[in-house]
Image (spheres, grey):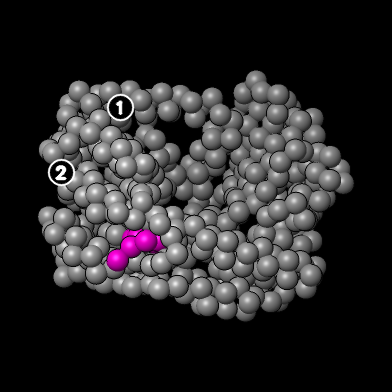
Amino acid sequence: MSVEVTKLLSGLTVVTDTMPHLETAALGVWAGVGGRDEKPNEHGISHLLEHMAFKGTTRRSSREIVEEIEAVGGDLNAGTSTETTAYYARVLKADVPLALDVLSDILANPSFVPDELEREKGVIVQEIGAAQDTPDDVVFEHLNELCYPDQPMGRSLLGTAKTLKAFNRDMLGDYLSTHYRAPDMVVAAAGAVDHKRIVEDVTVRFASFQPTPAPKPQPAMFGKGGSRVVHRDLEQAHLTLALEGVPQGDLSLFSLQVFTNTLGGGMSSRLFQEVREKRGLCYSIYTFHAPYSDTGFFGLYTGTDPADAPEMMEVVVDVITDAVETLTEAEVARAKAQMKAGLLMALESCSSRAEQLARHVLAYGRPQTVEELVARIEAVSVESSRNAARALLSRSRPAVVALGSGRGLDTAVSFAEGLTKSKAKTLLH
């Protein structure tokens, strides 16, 4: 890779990865602000601000924004997460300056036209309604609340109809100026790009962003665990389980990720093989680990017939506790191969490269090389994965949420709550 990094006097970081064989480029602006930065009366404002970025500037109408990019065959999009908000484009090589001009314009000069604002608030209310009709979304919304009670991280990114109604252009402008600060922003580009030219453009186009850092969000506090059964008349029972994981900078991160993959990261994983293939108790089951700046979130999801929920959750608990002590060399090698393949395959996409560069700068202060990442994966051993798993089970009580109908859900939840008790505790000592 040909990665170059320049930190402007304002504190904004420009990072590029030149891929000479490409005729296209992916570029974007990543800001270190998301749902966890919101005060209670700002719930959903990060996501609304992302939507409003495309609804007009002092130089362009909402239609002109999309027409200029699509007129050259490009694509423009954005996304909000717990800790970041991204605005990005994919264009042909010759149109990189145009894309950068549009991206800077929507962030530096938003108009927040009242009519457009009211329309977009209505669109997001529809989005909230769609999410409430999706059991997968609903069950994880409840799980987040249980894991991070009375905290921004425990709230949905979409906000509520009530909080959305209260937002006005002044609130959006204040939130933008408070949280979109140069030291907390990264402009990343990959593909057919010229680092020097992008640095020159960014220096001019992002000059209005303040050089002082944005306020830090409140530290995350993983809750005390517990359970919640949400009764809905559904054909399937949706069950989730969470434990406190580790943050991005934790030395055990890759070892925990390997354990997570062996447990429920693919069709060869223990849970998939035991719960679905051998017993036929579900169609879908998987585990994941999401690291944040100061915490981590280990999660499990599965959907099953309500009558099978108790048996399935009992099997899940047995598989997890057994895996802690019986993880094999072959399983670890397979998980490491999957992680390396995912990393290297992503490098074939300039969009993935640009996103990875930006996320590394926001998380670690600099891009991490492929060699570094591969070395960290290779360093994982059976024992380090087992240790990471033992720590996972001892770090917190599980948070469990079941969504659906039938009397079996309460029994299933009680089995899941026992994950870090009895047998698991015996294994840890």
Mark 1 is surrounded, within 10 Å at the Cα level, by few (under 14), some (14 to 19) or many (20 or more) other residues, namely some
Residue at the spot 30% in from the left edge and 38% down from the top edge: 71
Type of amino acid at the residue the image marks with label 1: Lys
Q: Residue 343 occupies which quadrant of the picture?
A: bottom right
For label 2, the SS is: loop
Nearest the camera: 109 or 380? 109
Residue at the spot 37% in from the left edge and 28% down from the top edge: 124
Q: Position of residue 361 (x, y in %)?
A: 36, 67
The C terminus: image quadrant:
bottom right
Asked if residue 76 can be seen in this view, the reply is no
Type of amino acid at the residue the image marks with label 2: Asn
Q: Is residue 81 left or right of residue 389?
A: left
Which numbered disc covers residue 109?
A: 2
The N terminus: image quadrant:
bottom left
Please state which of the two labelled residues, at mark 2 or mark 1, is closer to the viewer.
2
Nearest the camera: 78 or 419? 78
Which numbered disc covers residue 121?
A: 1
Asked if residue 373 can be seen in this view, the reply is yes
Q: Is residue 8 above or below residue 157?
A: below
Q: Is residue 325 above or below residue 310?
A: below
Q: Which stretch did the figure color magenta? A: 188-194
Residue at the spot 30% in from the left edge and 27% down from the top edge: 121
Nearest the camera: 328 or 359? 359
Q: Is residue 184 left or right of residue 415?
A: left
Residue at the spot 33% in from the left edge and 73% down from the top edge: 4
Q: CA distance from mark 2 to mark 1?
A: 20 Å
